[in-house]
Image (cartoon, helix red, strand yellow):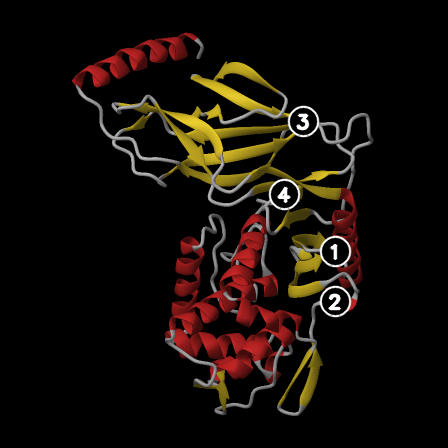
Amino acid sequence: MTEAKPGRTFSYLTKHIHTCALSIGILLTPLVANAEEALFDTKAKQALMVEDQTGTILFAKSPDTLIEPAALAKLMTMEVVFHELKAGRISQTTQYTVSENAWRTGGAPSGGSTMFAKLKSQLAVGDLVQGVIVQSANDGCIILAEGIAGSEAKFAELMNARAKEIGLTTSTFVNSTGLPDPKQRVSLTDLVKLARHIKKEYPEYYKTYAQDNFTWNNIFQRNRNPLLRLDIGADGMGTGYTEQSGYGIVGAAERGGRRYIVALSGLATDKERAEEAKRIFEWAYQAFEEVDIFAPNESVGEASVFGGVKSGVPLKAHEKVSILVPVANRDRLKAHVVYNGPLVAPLEADQKVGTLRIWIGDALVQETPVYTAEAVESGDLTERSLNAVFELTTGWMRRLNF
């Protein structure tokens, strides 16, 4: 991997050679000097908090540890259902029948979370979605799974296929409910990514996560998410519990134009889960401020080009690059554009070629795709020869510094 020359600096440039590559980094001056760092810790064994708009990681504690998802697996179930709705393969009025498997495994006889759907009755997809999201209904999950895919096992295949498509890299789903299975595991990193994806791709369906209650079969039930009643701006998303993983939650809240997603796991009680989730949201609201780093389409650096009419090409990000930083922070922000280089001509304009990575101290907190700002055509024989000589020379230098 190669790091690009910066498009500008915020304080000064430092040239350094590492990992066999010549690189130039961007160092940003601290926002608040000589101030106490904003510290936070949690009783949760695993935790991850991300600011939704910028993607800034505000807090992380073992977020890639694989855990039992429990009912949090229902987030993936709903993603598949929303995807089917958006594609037009099903509708809110599509009717599915309550099988004996759905009734026994997830309904009234099961003793678990249920919407009490009657055996062999028919339910509309719109009602099933509310039952799953508001009541965490296991019977609702199985009815949807069997209706969409024919069986829960086939539906789990859809869950894993969709998980891969949206970039979940470590999680494996075995059923639609999250009921215990030794093969079913997720990471908080994947759960937060999934939560952000659902809000972005399905805003009309996401609203259901903020629904306070739902009545089905003349039974009134409140939303199981405790954050909705804590006056912190929460509008989602779900909770879960297993004996092995403890109490967990994926929460989403917005205040003052900033939206945060948190995932916690390994808490001892449901009371502790609610308290810790509220505490981390309140901390995030108070401890961070947003800083703009690059404007939309502004040059963030330059990548080397081999075999082109130019030896380099400017790089840009499509959107404004902003980051949340601690109000009290003495660490410098550090940004690098990383790409496989040199790039080989011809290159098209707006071609994705790398990633802008931003650190606060030693923590990687944000990654943004970068694209070529202009096209680069192939050069003539002389230009190619000069490029080859340059590459041989710098390659020798890299080997010396390995």
Say which residue label 1 marks.
277
Q: Is the residue under label 2 in contact with that under label 1 (CB below 8 Å)?
A: yes
10 Å neighbourhood of mark 1: few (<14), some, or many (≥20)?
many
Q: Name the N-terminal-most of marks 2 and 3.
A: 2
Say which residue label 3 marks.
332
The disc labelled 4 sits on which kind of residue?
A: Ile
**Relative to residue 116, is residue 23 drawn left or right?**
left
Say which residue label 4 marks.
57
The disc labelled 3 sits on which kind of residue?
A: Arg
Q: Nearer the viewer, residue 35 or 62?
A: 35
Residue sitting at 51 percent across and 42 percent down?
Answer: 296
**Relative to residue 220, is residue 382 drawn left or right?**
left
The disc labelled 1 sits on which kind of residue?
A: Ala
* Nearer to us: label 4 or label 2: 4
Residue sitting at 77 percent across and 57 percent down?
Answer: 278
> Where residue 255 sits: x, y (%)?
72, 57
Q: CA gap, disc 1 to disc 4?
A: 16 Å
